[in-house]
Amino acid sequence: MSDDEALFEEVGRLVDTRADWHFEPSTTPAGSPSWCLDPGGEVRLSVNVSGGAITLYLPATDQDVVVPSVVALETWLDENDGRFR
């Protein structure tokens, strides 16, 4: 297992305990799978891992947010989760 795969699994263990998150497999051969928050059926936030970085994508603003660790991701989600519901 690669470092990115292990980190992605760690991210999955975190978000899988939260409501409205699901795993979204890659739809292209070179793409990365994501964990997505989609209350009501529309993706509001996605998280993927590449090159050792955890990146959140906010579709409403077309913005990426990079966090340095799973602990930082947890903190970010705790502080911002309500904005996406």
Image (spheres, rainbow, N blue to C red):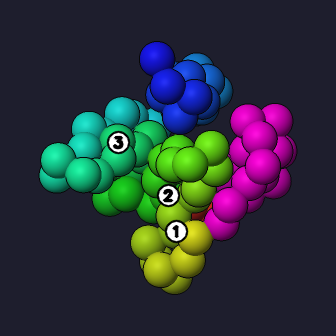
Looking at numbered disc 3 in the image, what kind of residue is underneath it?
A: Pro
The span from disc 1 to disc 2 (Cα, nearest Å) is 5 Å
Q: Nearer the viewer, mark 3 or mark 2?
A: 3
* Residue 76 in the image, given as x and y percentages of width and height: 77, 52
* Residue 68 in the image, given as x and y percentages of width and height: 78, 49
Looking at this view, is 7 or 74 the one in front? 7
Q: Kindly tell me whether residue 17 is visible in this rendering.
A: no
Residue at the disc numbered 2 = 45
Q: Secondary structure at mark 1?
A: strand
Point 58% across, 70% down: residue? 64
Residue at the disc numbered 3 = 33
Mark 3 neighbour density, 10 Å: few (under 14) some (14–19) many (20 or more): some
Residue at the disc numbered 1 = 58
Magenta range is 65-82
Among the 4 quarters of the image, the one containing residue 70: top right
Looking at this view, is 70 or 16 the one in front? 70
- In the picture, measured across the screen, residue 60 lies left or right of residue 29, that is right
